[in-house]
Image (spheres, grey):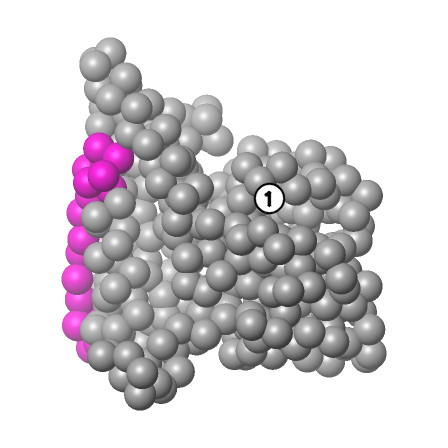
Amino acid sequence: MNLIDGNKVAAEIKQEIAEEVKQIIDNGGKQPHLAAILVGHDGGSETYVAYKIKDCEAVGFKSSLIRYEDDVTEEELLAKVEELNNDDDLDGFIVQLPLPKHISEQKVIEAIDPRKDVDGFHPINVGRMVIGLPSFVSATPYGIVELLKRYNIETSGKNCVVLGRSNIVGRPMSVLMSQKAINATVTVAHSRTANLKEVCANADILIVAMGVPEFVTADMVKEGAVVIDVGTTRVKSDKTKSGWKLKGDVLYDEVAPKCSYITPVPGGVGPMTRTSLLLNTLLSAKKEIYK
């Protein structure tokens, strides 16, 4: 069993980005600039955004954080999005999800200029990705593809099962895995799939994004499979100072011995999600997606 170390790969990519940014600035180019809008004080969102700011500093990006309280109106938030769309110094920005219930997440996503949508959530970017045009790809799927490449994991002709169908991970992941550069044969499975255990056990590559802690057990995994665990659920624990720990969607101790490669939680896919946001911002700064 080989461990896919997301922290190690993310550190390598960040070093590569930092060197490229230094070269851009040394040649008189503009410092890439990423902004984040954070609404409220959700613990997970606070942590994630803090990491993003730290990541920007590490690679030489300029970063901005715009904060709002939970009671911000939808109109006020949309006005800020429009302002950022028109800010020529800004290469990309994200609106951290989830948002309060009185704000339509879809309306906010669609208000973002696709050319600055470094989260890759806008329907235009999703559509461009589906038909193989240059696009900003959703950060988690982008990061997973990068992990597979950097570990030289064979994907061509392999049977890939994507467990989960969210717009952020499952759906874009299935499209990417079927594209010509990767050439896997893809099945999208979910909670309503008949014979789910058998479907998963037939996978050479199993990508799990259900959001259900320890859902995948050893009897659902083929001997020698590659298992990518996207799950990050906080569960209560009396063994940690914080009182909680992160659990993946895979019952790791039981499944890992059967795998050729597996991602841990934490330290697998998570660091790559953040790094992919930096890669998208760099692509935007270099005008490589939208000329």
Does 65 lie within the magenta span? Answer: yes
Q: Quadrant of the N terminus?
A: bottom right
Q: Residue at x 28, y 17 (%)?
A: 23
Q: In screen coordinates, is 14 left or right of 288?
A: left
Q: Residue at x 26, y 54 (%)?
A: 51
Quadrant assignment, res 205: bottom right
Q: Is residue 281 above or below residue 105?
A: above
Regarding residue 210, the answer to whether it shows in the image is: no
How far across and how far down the image is residue 239, in percent? Answer: 31, 83
Quadrant assignment, res 101: bottom left
Q: Which residue is mark 1?
A: 148
Q: Residue at x 49, y 41 (%)?
A: 136
Q: Is residue 239 above or below residue 13?
A: below
Q: Residue at x 48, y 55 (%)?
A: 269
Determine the secondary structure under disc 1.
helix
Task: Count every numbered label the image shows and give the total.
Answer: 1
Q: In screen coordinates, is 28 left or right of 107?
A: left
Of residue 99 and residue 13, the one placed in the foreground of this image is 13
Q: Count residues near mark 1 (Cα–Cα under 10 Å), then give few for <14, some for 14-19, many for 20+.
A: some
Of residue 291 and residue 63, the one placed in the foreground of this image is 63
Q: In screen coordinates, is 185 left or right of 259?
A: right
Q: Please, what is the three-letter code of the amino acid marked with disc 1?
A: Leu
Q: Residue furthest top?
A: 27
Regarding residue 93, the answer to whether it shows in the image is: yes
How far across and how far down the image is residue 147, in percent? Answer: 54, 44
Does 75 lie within the magenta span? Answer: no
Q: In screen coordinates, is 233 left or right of 159?
A: left
How far across and how far down the image is residue 282, in percent? Answer: 36, 32
How far across and how far down the image is residue 219, in percent? Answer: 74, 76
Query: For the magenta stretch, what is the residue range?
Result: 56-72
